[in-house]
Image: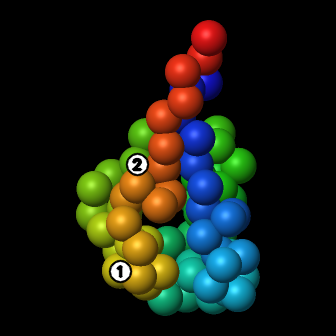
Amino acid sequence: MAIIVNLDVVLAQRKLKLKDLSEQVEISMQNLSILKSGKAKAIRFSTLNAICKALQCTPGDLIEYRDDE
């Protein structure tokens, strides 16, 4: 897939655990884990907004596009 989720990278840069983020944004660990692993099919803008606010980052820090070629 050409969409890469860098949630694990941003969490490591912030020295945060997935559990801490889950508590801050009130999103289940399971849903964040699916997003972190890149298996998510979609993300709501409200969820993306909450994650960016908690991590003090932009959507571009979390999600990137790479051509499959």
Residue in the image at 48% along x and 35% along y: 65
- Residue type for callout 2: Ile
- Say which mark, if any, is on residue 27: none
- Say which mark, if any, is on residue 43: 2
Helix, strand or loop at mark 2: loop
Q: Against 15, is 61 above or below?
A: above
Place of residue 33 in the rendered image (x, y in percent of width and height, measured from the top left): 68, 59
- Say which mark, if any, is on residue 53: 1
Q: Against 41, is 62 above or below?
A: below
Q: Residues within 10 Å of mark 1 (few under 14, many from 20)?
A: some
Q: Which quadrant: the N terminus?
A: top right
Q: Residues within 10 Å of mark 2 (few under 14, many from 20)?
A: few
Between 15 and 67, the one lying in front of the other is 67
Place of residue 59 in the rendered image (x, y in percent of width and height, measured from the top left): 38, 59
- Residue 41 visible to the viewer: no
- Residue type for callout 1: Lys
Between 5 and 35, the one lying in front of the other is 5
